[in-house]
Image (tube, rainbow, N blue to C red):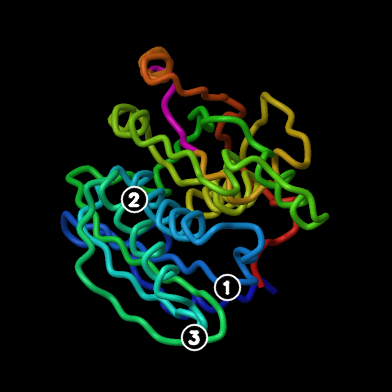
Amino acid sequence: MNKEDFFISGFQNSFIGDDGAVVGEFVYSKDLFCEDIHFKREWFSLTQIVEKSFLVNISDAIVMNAKPKYTLIGIKIPKNFTKDELLEINAAFKKIASLYNITIIGGDTIAGDKLDISITIISQTKNPIFRKGVKVGDYLAHTGELGESLKDLNRLFMGQKISKNSKFIRPKLKDKFFYKVAPFINSALDISDGLYKDLSRLGVINQIGFKFIKKFKKNEACSGEEYEILFSFNKKNLQKIKAIAQKTKTKITIFAIAKRGKFKNQCKENHF
């Protein structure tokens, strides 16, 4: 049993089930980033921890075609942290907020033994993109390359070092591409739990299956924390989407066509 899905199913309403909750013109999204669950302190600098915790939540806003406006930060700070460490955390939050024109409007702090971060982002959109909207015959595509995050995670578990430019350390968001392409797509979400897992979410909510036109290696299909964009679109928009991808220097891979049927995730669950 996937306990995450079971728990969330107890709060059924029209707002739950996407990367964020759309209420009027606003989108509300929230993520937790916890020590020894999402990261180990020896893998990241404090700056890298904070930046990733912020970026993965901004990713949720982007794939709903929303512009982040405000954020609330909850943070459990280890009791032994120094003043310099607190200043580093503060500077990292302000750096990402400045890059995306986000105003930090409050939150909460508490002392503890481990570093845990909770971020709520309030975004704005007039034309949200949902997970629901895939139609039979749609093309399915993803941005970027898949598999790097899983490979680097395994390297870290083996005590090896990875590049500071790894997507596992700093997600590479595709906001410039997505905001331009949004008028021409039918659905989207970011690949946080692996392509097959997130594809299964599209399958369930849209009650469809997929005919694959590209084969994936296991590490590509099952690699979580990629934060690439998974999206569907009508084939009539193919040339427009390719042109936008070329203009924004964004690699896209068309890998499947939506069909009637079901899709089963064949990767190991990442959640408890």
Task: Mark 2 vs mark 1: give the one in front.
Answer: 2
Q: Quadrant of residue 181?
A: top left
Please tell me which of labels 3 and 2 falls first in the chain. 3
CA separation in Å, label 2 and label 1? 29 Å
Identify the main secondary structure in magenta. Answer: strand
Identify which residue, 46 or 262, lies in the foreground. 46
Question: Could you say which quadrant of the image residue 22 lies in?
Answer: bottom left
Q: Earlier in the sequence, mark 1 or mark 3?
A: 1
Looking at the picture, tell me which residue is in the foreground, 70 or 3.
Answer: 70
Q: Give the residue type at disc 2.
A: Ile
Determine whether, in the image, residue 262 is placed left or right of residue 57.
right
Tell whether 101 sits left or right of 15. Answer: left
Q: Secondary structure at mark 1?
A: helix
**Residue 205 rendering spot, x and y as whole percentages:** 49, 54
Q: Which residues are magenta?
A: 229-236
Residue beneath label 2, please?
96
Query: Residue lying farthest right?
Result: 158
Which quadrant would the N terminus be assigned to in this image?
Answer: bottom right
Could you tell me which quadrant the C terminus lies in? Answer: bottom right
The answer to whether 69 is drawn above or below residue 211 in the figure is: below
Under mark 3, the amino acid is: Lys
Q: Is residue 245 magenta?
A: no
* Residue at 51% over, 31% down: 143
Residue 102 placement (x, y as % from top left): 23, 53
**Mark 1 residue type:** Glu
Q: Is residue 68 left or right of residue 138?
A: left
Q: Percent x, y for residue 138?
A: 48, 29
Q: Which residue is mark 1?
A: 4
Of the residues under marks 2 and 1, which one precedes in the sequence? 1
Q: Which mark, residue 79?
A: 3
- Residue 268 drawn above or below residue 165: below
**Which quarter of the picture shows residue 249?**
top left
